[in-house]
Image (cartoon, rainbow, N blue to C red):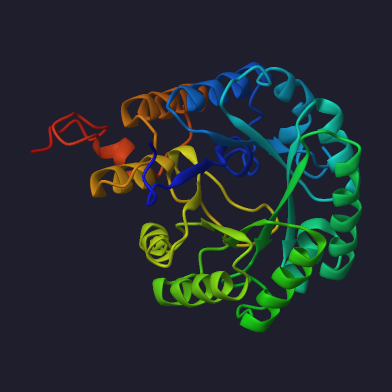
């Protein structure tokens, strides 16, 4: 039986981790990476994004990637979609769990998807209407710039709650609060997650933190303390929004899993197999620097990339 305080780690590396790379990762390597991640025990993997390939060329092969991993058992495969067309393309590929993204910040939404937040909400409504035609389809919401915007800096709490309320009224039951550019701090995380969960008890909230300013794990722990149990992270600490200046990598999956496992919090993830996935990522992208502290240092008593054996 899985304990009540268990967490679910949502791996976003194949999407958020790869989207900002200049180097194109071949289709078979993307498929192999997703399979390596699944072998570690991760049970939800964001496989990529159905976007215009002119905007993000990395995902021009998304349909082929999805076809290569649909046979994975016990793994929830998701894909990010910015609009109705992206949702239709994702559904045609065979995927049934969609993640729609809206920025609380008007400026970032315009830069990110070329729509106002209000226009994005209309797109979300159209996507939800597709659920009656596709068995097993579900739509979740990523609420970007919840904790700060690269253009407007501060985001008002009432604006966050307004978006959550409107999405909930459409039938959305899972919302991830995203720190798109790494502005969040633990006290702010406690305040916003607590308020959202208390105000909207029928909605399940997750969190998505970037480690841009070194507070990713602290923010994750703060969210855990308020009752959040779904945490996005990226293998190797890769990531960053191409349309948000200054946005660097996500919280590393290895570091997040290690923290929770050492605390005795059930993750269901085998850290040794997860580090094998990190090593595979390094092999297919040898010029890339992984920011995961655990990957660099190794597990206690093992040799990390530093070459030292830890006591």
- Residue 168 position within the rendered picture, expressed as x and y whole percent measured from the top left: 74, 65
Quadrant housing residue 223? bottom left
Figure label count: 0
Q: Residue at x 84, y 42 (%)?
A: 87
Tell me if I can see residue 212 in this picture.
yes
Quadrant housing residue 113? bottom right
Quadrant housing residue 141? bottom right
- Residue 252 position within the rendered picture, expressed as x and y whole percent measured from the top left: 43, 45
Residue 62, placed above or below residue 21 = above
Q: Residue at x 42, y 26 (%)?
A: 40
- Residue 207 position within the rendered picture, expressed as x and y whole percent measured from the top left: 53, 58
Give the side of residue 69 with respect to residue 52, left or right. left
For this orientation, the residue located farthest to the front is 1
Quarter of the image where the C terminus is located? top left
Residue 131, placed above or below residue 161 = above
Between 309 and 80, which is closer to the camera in this rendering?
Answer: 80
Q: Residue at x 89, y 42 (%)?
A: 132
- Residue 104 position within the rendered picture, expressed as x and y whole percent measured from the top left: 71, 71
For this orientation, the residue located farthest to the left is 311
Residue 92, placed above or below residue 109 = above
Q: Residue at x 78, y 58 (%)?
A: 171
Tell me if I can see residue 156 in this picture.
no
Quarter of the image where the N terminus is located? top left
Between 98 and 22, which is closer to the camera in this rendering?
Answer: 98
């Amino acid at each position: 039986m899985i304990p009540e305080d268990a967490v679910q780690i949502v791996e976003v590396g194949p999407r958020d981790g790869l989207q900002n790379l200049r180097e194109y990762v071949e289709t078979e390597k993307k498929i192999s990476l997703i399979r390596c991640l699944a072998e570690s025990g991760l049970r939800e993997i964001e496989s990529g994004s159905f976007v215009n390939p002119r905007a993000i060329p990395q995902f021009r092969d998304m349909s082929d990637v999805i076809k290569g991993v649909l046979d994975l058992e016990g793994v929830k495969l998701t894909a990010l979609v910015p609009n109705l067309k992206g949702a239709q393309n994702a559904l045609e590929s065979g995927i049934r769990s969609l993640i729609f993204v809206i920025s609380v910040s008007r400026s970032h939404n315009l830069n990110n998807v070329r729509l106002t937040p209000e226009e994005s909400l209309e797109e979300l409504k159209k996507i939800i209407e597709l659920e009656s035609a596709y068995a097993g389809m579900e739509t979740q919401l990523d609420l970007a710039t919840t904790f700060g915007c690269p253009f407007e800096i501060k985001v008002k709490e009432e604006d966050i709650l307004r978006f959550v309320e409107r999405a909930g009224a459409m039938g959305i039951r899972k919302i991830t609060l995203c720190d798109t550019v790494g502005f969040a701090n633990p006290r702010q995380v406690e305040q916003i997650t607590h308020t959202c969960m208390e105000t909207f008890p029928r909605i399940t909230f997750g969190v998505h933190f970037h480690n841009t300013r070194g507070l990713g794990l602290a923010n994750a722990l703060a969210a855990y303390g308020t009752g959040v149990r779904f945490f996005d992270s990226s293998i190797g600490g890769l990531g960053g929004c191409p349309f948000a200046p200054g946005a660097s990598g996500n919280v590393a999956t290895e570091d997040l899993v290690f923290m929770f496992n050492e605390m005795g919090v059930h993750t269901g993830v085998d850290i040794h197999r997860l580090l094998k996935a990190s090593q595979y990522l390094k092999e297919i992208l040898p010029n890339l620097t992984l920011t995961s502290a655990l990957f660099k240092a190794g597990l206690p008593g093992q040799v990390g990339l530093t070459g030292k054996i830890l006591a």
